[in-house]
Image (cartoon, grey):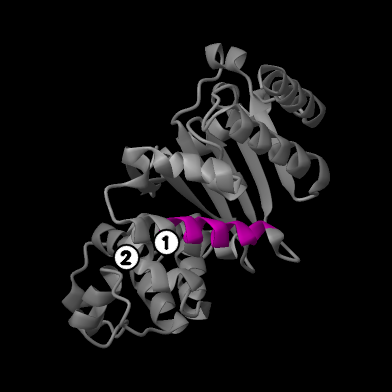
């Protein structure tokens, strides 16, 4: 989160044509080294909300703009966050994924499309184990690191068990649900879990994106997540794009963010409704039972 926050501040300062010394002379920050550490996302630099407000005012970022709300939301989130639960697993949690865990923990809404694997927040233990058995997904590290990654994923799933969980919408590609990943028994258990979550959780919305919709509304990427953070002036959105555990990036540019948001909306509009999703999941469960 600090890295994303710092990059946004750097971008606004550059757009304003100001150097670090300019910011110091204007009284928005105490020293150029401190500003540099903030912009680089250093974890050992302290700042106050007023510091960031002064910077944004100096950079001519309008208070009513989405850019202003986005930066201030991140600043408040950083200031309110204590050492996260995954801190003890730092060695196996990549920077972009660490940011995702930060943002998920404070999000009011999460909208995700997945075309590769069942979303991590919804994976059963057996399905997760099957995913991590694939060399390029489990990585080449030690068994200890692989076990830590599994622990992180299981703890991450507790997000949906909160008393007041975020509103979670998972758009899952039909094709991945037809792959017997891990074998028929593993996939059957996973499908039953998805059915239960879809049917019984008020704040979890699982929808199947049918293969037939690809001809009219192909997703922009194979895995993308839009997160909404609440704040007094209105929500701020952040978008995370992943390439099958190979790489992940945060989409910052407004035009690209709009493109991905529109793609997610299109996928949602062409996805099956709740009743049809449940029917599809039940049919797949029955099919796997017949094969066993």
Question: Which quadrant is the C terminus positioned in?
Answer: top right
- Give residue 148's mark: 1
- Total number of numbered labels? 2
Estimate how packed mark 2 is, as few (under 14), some (14 to 19) or many (20 or more) residues with alpha carbons within 10 Å.
Answer: few
Residue drawn at point x = 80 percent, y = 49 percent: 202
For marks 2 and 1, give the one nearer the viewer: 1
Residue 93 at least partly seen: no
Q: Position of residue 68 (x, y in %)?
A: 47, 63
Residue under the point 42% across and 73% down: 87
Which residue is rendered at x = 41% and y = 41% of the image? 133
Q: Determine which residue is flagged by label 2.
A: 91
Q: Do labels 2 and 1 touch, CB within 8 Å? A: yes
Q: Name the residue rendered at 30%, 70% in the picture.
A: 41
As drawn, is 42 to the left or to the right of 209?
A: left
What is the span of residues highlighted in magenta in the rendered image?
148-160
Q: Verify whether residue 157 appears in magenta.
A: yes
Nearer to the camera, 79 or 210:
210
Residue 92, percent across and down?
Answer: 35, 60
Q: Mark 1 falls on what kind of element?
A: helix
């Amino acid at each position: 989160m600090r890295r994303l926050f710092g990059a946004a501040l750097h971008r606004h300062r550059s757009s304003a044509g100001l150097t670090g010394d300019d910011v110091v002379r204007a009284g928005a920050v105490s020293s150029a080294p401190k500003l540099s550490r903030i912009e680089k996302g250093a974890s050992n630099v302290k700042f106050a909300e007023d510091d960031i407000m002064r910077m944004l005012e100096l950079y001519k970022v309008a208070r009513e703009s989405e850019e202003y709300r986005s930066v201030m939301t991140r600043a408040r989130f950083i200031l309110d966050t204590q050492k996260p639960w995954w801190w003890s697993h730092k060695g196996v949690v990549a920077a972009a994924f660490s940011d995702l865990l930060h943002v998920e923990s404070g999000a009011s809404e999460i909208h995700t499309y997945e075309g590769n694997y069942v979303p991590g927040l919804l994976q059963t233990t057996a399905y997760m184990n099957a995913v991590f058995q694939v060399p390029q997904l489990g990585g080449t590290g030690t068994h200890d690191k692989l076990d830590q990654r599994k622990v992180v994923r299981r703890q991450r799933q507790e997000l949906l068990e909160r008393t007041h969980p975020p509103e979670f919408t998972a758009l899952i590609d039909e094709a991945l649900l037809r792959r017997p990943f891990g074998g028929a028994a593993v996939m059957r258990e996973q499908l039953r879990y998805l059915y239960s979550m879809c049917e019984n959780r008020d704040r979890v919305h699982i929808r199947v994106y049918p293969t037939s919709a690809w001809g009219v509304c192909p997703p922009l990427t194979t895995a993308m997540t839009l997160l909404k953070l609440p704040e007094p002036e209105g929500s701020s959105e952040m978008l995370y794009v992943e390439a099958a555990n190979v790489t992940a990036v945060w989409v910052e540019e407004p035009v690209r963010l709009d493109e991905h948001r529109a793609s997610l909306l299109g996928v949602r509009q062409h996805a099956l409704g709740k009743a049809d999703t449940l029917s599809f999941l039940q049919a797949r469960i029955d099919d796997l039972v017949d094969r066993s």
